[in-house]
Amino acid sequence: MLIDTHSHIYEPEFDVDRAEALTRCKESGVELLMLPAIDKLSYQRMFDLSKASDMVRPMMGLHPTSVNENASWREDLQLVEHYLQHPPQGIERFWGVGEIGLDFYWSKDFCGEQIEAFKAQIDMSLKYNLPIVVHTRDAWEQMCSVMEQYAGRGVRGIFHAFSADVECYERLKQCGDFLFGIGGVVTFKKSKLAEVVKQMNLNDLVVETDCPYLTPAPHRGQRNESSYVTFVCAKVAELQGVDYEVVASQTTANAKRIFNL
């Protein structure tokens, strides 16, 4: 059994065949999909799928790039907390605060705003005793600096789409109870992440797709989907030198623990 710890299967790319994609998950042994939120433009799509399928578990948060050029981002944070306190009818609860974080790839003009929004949502995770699911792009040094401010305060969660080096991995581990999401990038030829995964502890790993993005080999260039997490699991097993079943079992146990499933 596998858990895709990061799936955007509620996005429009799946409107034509979402039910079939979920069936392919079941057939591949993928039992559960964790759904990170993005922003108010897509919340309802995530809510609708969460009500319709028992295979998914929703989270709530404001994506860092949704802070950029958004004059109402502080109001959007208030909406995040409102939903954490009062889930929509038909949704029992949210299982994490995510996806949140720092992304300076597109612009460095909103670094201060992104850091403020990120910290506010970490504080929410502590208030509501939920794990965080953290997006980081072109901001690993800043990410480490922020997380070190929270060391010893009980923060827990997943660094989604981990792509940094072993030093960053070790540094972040000191900041709280953290797991590291390994996705399709690990299957790419000449992937630097592959060399890092060899040195990581399997007890620290979960597998993910980030579908419809970051499609693993051999389907690179096509739309990603949650059933493809099996290719990630197989690559991690190869790099760790263990059987597929060992990685599937351990990463599933890791995910269930961090999300309190």
Image (tube, grey):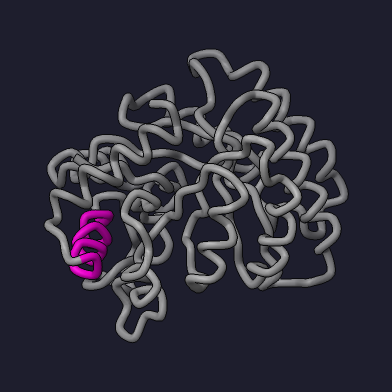
Q: Main secondary structure of the magenta part?
A: helix
Q: Residue at x 76, y 53 (%)?
A: 67
Q: Residue at x 54, y 34 (%)?
A: 96
Q: Residue at x 67, y 61 (%)?
A: 144
Q: Position of 33 compared to 159: left or right?
A: left
Where residue 125 appears, x then y in whole percent? 65, 33
Q: Residue at x 81, y 63 (%)?
A: 111
In the picture, residue 60 is in which quadrant?
A: top right
In the picture, residue 202 is in which quadrant?
A: bottom left
Where residue 195 appears, x then y in whole percent? 35, 77
Relative to residue 224, is residue 79 depicted above or below?
above
Relative to residue 165, is residue 249 depicted above or below?
above
Q: Position of 160 compared to 221: left or right?
A: right
> Is residue 196 part of the magenta span, yes or no?
no
Where residue 216 appears, x then y in whole percent? 30, 67
Q: Looking at this view, is 112 or 172 the one in front?
A: 172
Q: Position of 258 compared to 140: left or right?
A: left
Q: Looking at this view, is 119 or 50 the one in front?
A: 119
> Is residue 231 part of the magenta span, yes or no?
yes
Tell me the quadrant of the picture where the N terminus can be found: top left
Q: How many marks?
A: 0
Where residue 34 appears, x then y in whole percent? 41, 39
State the residue lying farthest toward the bottom.
190
Relative to residue 55, is residue 17 depicted above or below?
below
Q: Looking at this view, is 167 or 29 the one in front?
A: 167
What range is drawn magenta here? 228-240
Tell me the quadrant of the picture where the C terminus can be found: top left
